[in-house]
Amino acid sequence: MGEKRESITKLLNGRVFWLPAVLTLIVVVWGFAAPASFASAANAGLAWVLENFNWFLVPLTFGAVLFCLWSAFSRYGKIRLGGEDAQPKVKTVTWFAISLCSGMGIGITYFATYQPLELFYNPPAFLENVMAGSEEALTYAMRFSFLEWGFHPYALYTCFGIVIAFMFYNGKRRYRVSDGLYPLLGDRVDGIVGDLLDCFAIFVIIGGLGASAGTAIMQVGQGCQHLFGVGNGLGGWLVLTVILAAVYILGSATGIHKWLSWFGNANLYLYVIMMVFALFAIDGVGVLEVLFSSIGDYIQNFIGTSLYLEPLAGTGWVGANNTFFFTWWMVFAPFTGLFLIKLAYGRTLREFVLVNMIVPAIFVLVWFSVFGGGAILWDTENGGAIYATIQEMGPSMAWYALFDQLPLSKVTNVVAWIIVTISFVTLAESLTMSLASMSCKGYADTTGETQPPKILCVFWGVLIAAVSYMLLYSGGRDAIETVVVICGLPTGVFMLAMMLSHIKAMRHCEKYDLSKDPTRLDRE
């Protein structure tokens, strides 16, 4: 036993591990012991962020899109991660599948039907002259859904990934988020400054992943109730939390290629099958008309919509919607980016942007057109049946409510439930592995394939599950949304620094690109 304890101690990076672990445990205890107090403090923080920082968070997200495009299509896009002779370790299809699922798999199943319908029947408050249920309402519903789920969120993930990937594979730095700031901070990232940045990143992603897990559990629980008659309350959520945590912890402790690749590929095929089925079952011609009309409108109004802050109307809609979603993605960005680089060895920066931002965003635009635009078409011709169900049972029922209206509903709803479950497992598994990797020392790895210690995967997986259930216990979806927005603000400041760091690294590429040196520098 003494030898085992010593080996674990040697693996653990206490300077990065203990602070976020203890802070998270305190928050969990607070949420369970005094849910009203926790909700009150979180709501106060949310109001402060939305009132004072829309001007920063919304333009910053647009800046991330420009940053990724510059990284891909400037002369720096030809830089190969790992050096000129590095060869990819993962097939492109598998890479894309894992990127799609680990990025927003849960989000696009939860919101693809609900959000366009909600905006169609309740247009943004600042659009006073837009009638609910009109052609114009459809246009705005798809425009804002595309804005919040298309290129912007994937740009945030990819933005962090670009910076960390270059410094890890080519700059010979450590597998840590803070090392992306090496061009700005120099050797200070090896000391207390870097440790605090990594502690912050770990603490934030636990909150973000716990929030996402809570959303997933509500949707999986809704599916269980709808399909199998199992209760969908706190008791049912607790059982689901334990089961899902066991699955993603087991997956994260057995290696990326044994579970994650299979899940990612399987889910991609299910996504495509369900999307094609819904396209023809709803109205193939009508959905395609929505798709191309909406994409045209989205492109035409891309810059204006990306930067709009309703300065005169001041209804708060932009903050509660655009800012909320953008900060949600920011919370996930450091560790999603950290995970994505594990699949990017041997790829160019241009390929990194194409596979992690551009192609997934295009897929999501089609996805929302089919399941959101299609739901609007169906509801306008069938008396609003889908939206009525959502109003009665909540947003987590939206996707199932759509399939209830289509042929083979018993089969398609089961498949829909499976997709939701796999999407969450893929996300939680990937980020649990990244947390474990970040909190151990001696993580020497040149190709992104080294497996982090199993005990750390188990610890972080259990803690994430505890956070997710605490959020459900203390306020459900409202508590989840509040925590996400608060955590997103400091992450946005971190992201701005990361982009500036990468720009400096590119301007002095000969100094920071050490990939031609066969000897990996040990800076642990």
Image: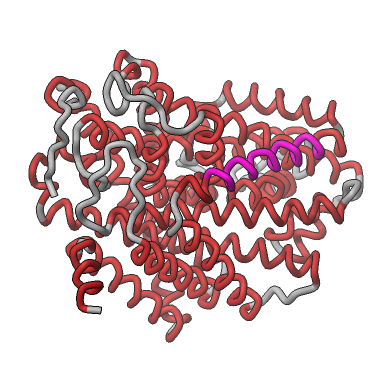
Residue farthest to the top, as pictured: 75
Q: Quadrant of the N terminus?
A: bottom left
Tell me the chief SS of the magenta region.
helix
Residue 274's quadrant in the figure? top right
* Nearer-the-camera pick, 394 or 102: 102
**Rendering coords of residue 154 (x, y %):** 47, 37
Residue 416 spot, x, y in % from top left:
73, 52
The image's colouring method is: secondary structure
Magenta region, residue range: 261-278
Q: Residue at x 59, y 60 (%)?
A: 216
> Which residue shows up at 13% across the image and 50% down it?
524
Residue 129 in the magenta stretch? The answer is no
Left or right: where 458 falls relative to 285: left
* Above/below status of 469 relative to 331: below
Q: Is residue 469 above or below residue 56?
A: below
**Can residue 315 be seen in the rendering of this structure?**
no
- Number of marks in the image? 0
Q: Nearer the viewer, residue 22 or 33?
A: 22
Locate residue 166: give its quadrant.
top left
Image coordinates for residue 22, horizontal then vertical, percent: 28, 73
Q: Is residue 13 left or right of residue 249?
A: left
Residue drawn at x 20%, y 78% as measured from the top left: 2
Q: Where is residue 514 drawn, in percent x and y?
A: 16, 27
User: Is 73 or 289 nearer to us in this picture?
Assistant: 73
Q: From the viewer's perspective, is residue 69 above or below residue 184? A: above
Q: Is residue 44 visible?
A: yes
